[in-house]
Image (cartoon, helix red, strand yellow):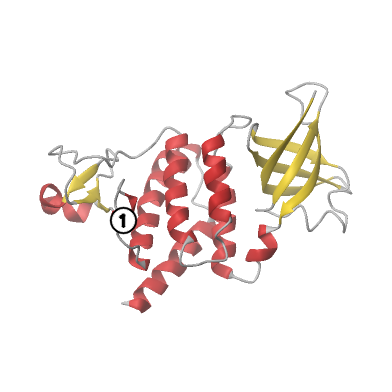
Amino acid sequence: MNWTDEGIILSVRAHGETAALVELFTRAHGRHLGLVHGGRSRKQRPVLQTGNHVDAAWKGRLPEHLGHMTLELRTGYAAQAMDDPLALNGLTALAALSRMLPERDPHPSLYEITLFVLGFLDDTTVWPALLVRWEMALLSELGFGLDLGACAATGSNDALVYVSPKSGRAVSASAGEPYRDKLLRLPEFLLEGRRAGVTEADVVDGLRLTRFFLETRVLRPRELDVPEPRLRLEAMLAADAARAD
């Protein structure tokens, strides 16, 4: 059996003396592993970097086998981010969180969003907010999407500024005021149809919101911690937001 697809490299591990075990997030075949012969060679090393967009050909005797991959570089996002600590942490965090997807289960919509985020890694004014939206999409793909359409208490869709940590539903300013210290901030740019500008503080609020649900709904049940690059990214952006105040 064999297939060809495109994908984003999520992880690379040494295998034996010369090969590499590569994990991809592919468009049509989901998260998929494969063995790349000569993957540790000088020629292959620049290709086999986390975050790179590649063309992949997979071959295995049976579908459930590990199989062998050959990869060709499309876009070297890893090299683009290498000299920018913020972008590098964003790229690495995105790849690490993508590994939460079920193996070999296609998620074409999330794949498209992933490429969209990576395409803006050279613009710090854009991609952090896109990453928040990506994490929202990841939660939805994993079955833990947030309900931000209307207030959980009143049913109104006006002045939605909080999210309940228990239900994952939006809460209006008036309904949430008595419990504001127990609720999560909801930045306006995450609300459907809202065109407000996005501040650095909005992005940090969005990252804190998605991190909470990724940690409690996805990672902790698997006995996993929030990836270190994701924590560093949030801390760096929070520091930038504090300096901007």
x, y (%) of residue 20? 80, 46
Q: Which of the image's four quarters has the N terminus?
A: top right
Q: What element carries label 1?
A: loop
Query: In the image, 52: left or right of 94?
Result: right
Query: In the image, 13: left or right of 171?
Result: right
Q: Which of the image's four quarters has the C terminus?
A: bottom left
x, y (%) of residue 35? 80, 39
Q: In the current view of this chain or complex, which residue is farthest to the top? A: 62
Q: How many discs mark residues in the rendered view?
A: 1
Q: Of the residues shown, which amino acid type is indicated by label 1?
A: Arg
Say whether residue 55 is visible: yes
Residue 98 lies in quadrant:
top right
Give me the residue at 20% from left, 56% from top. Answer: 181
Give me the residue at 79% from left, 44% from top. Answer: 71
Say whether residue 220 is visible: no
**Towards the viewer: 22 or 132:** 132
x, y (%) of residue 178? 10, 52
Give me the residue at 57% from left, 66% from top. Answer: 122
**Towards the viewer: 25 or 108:** 108
Query: In the image, 93: left or right of 57?
Result: left
Depicted 200 relative to depicted 22: above or below: below
Give me the residue at 50% from left, 57% from top. Answer: 230
Depicted 112 relative to depicted 89: above or below: above
Q: Residues within 10 Å of mark 1 (few under 14, many from 20)?
A: few
Q: Name the residue under label 1.
A: 195
Query: In the image, 138: left or right of 83?
Result: left
Depicted 26 relative to depicted 173: above or below: above
**Towards the viewer: 107 or 85:** 107
